[in-house]
Amino acid sequence: MRGGFNNRAERRAALADMHARNQQYPVGRLVEIAREDWPDVWTPPGIQRVWRDRRYLVQQYLDRGMIRLSVNVVAAKASLDRWVDGIPWDDLQRIKNQCGYADACAVELYPPETKVINVANLRHLWILPEPPAFMWGAKQEAA
């Protein structure tokens, strides 16, 4: 996220610009961004759809045959070296629902420490094709 800022005034201007751009989106209601409106920069492999609201950016990927929603807060720390953290469970549930997966189960993955990749404050929801056997209320098969 950092790039080309030589001083505090430039960082503050970038934060103010980000805040102003965020104001064009509704609070708590995701709006899908048409592909032709995506920035003219490198497009990550597998990306299919993008949504925004005033607080969040959501990107949908087809990743190894599964749908993954990547979610981040569209605000940066004052140093501009990290996205702001802190996405509540209720917001992730709402985001999953508003992206069209209200009837699907989703999971987050917490890998072994040696496999952690944390280059940004992103949360990833993997949309499951079927409810997992460990889900509360799932019917147990007779043994």
Image (cartoon, rainbow, N blue to C red):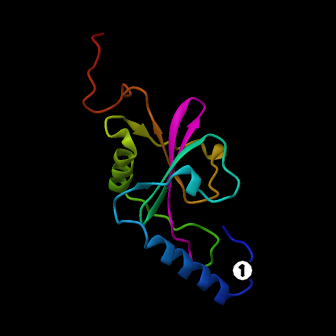
Report the label total: 1
Judged left or right of residue 11, residue 56 is left
Q: Residue drawn at (65%, 71%), measured in percent from left and top?
A: 81
Asked whether residue 88 is drawn in magenta, I would say no
Circle 1 sits on which residue? Answer: 5
Q: Which image quadrant: the C terminus?
A: top left
Position above or below: 133 against 74: above
The residue positioned farthest toward the bottom in the image shown: 9
Q: Which image quadrant: the N terminus?
A: bottom right
Rendering coords of residue 122 (x, y %): 54, 55
Q: Residue drawn at (62%, 74%), measured in percent from left and top?
A: 80
Rendering coords of residue 85 (x, y %): 49, 64
Position above or below: 118 against 128: below
Q: Secondary structure at mark 1?
A: loop
**Residue 103 image-quadrant placement:** top left
Q: Nearer the viewer, residue 51 or 78?
A: 51
- Indicate the amino acid at tag 1: Phe
Q: Residue drawn at (71%, 87%), measured in percent from left and top?
A: 7
**Residue 29 image-quadrant placement:** bottom left
Residue range of the region highlighted in magenta in the rendering = 58-77
Asked whether residue 76 is drawn in magenta, I would say yes
Q: Residue drawn at (53%, 32%), measured in percent from left and top?
A: 66
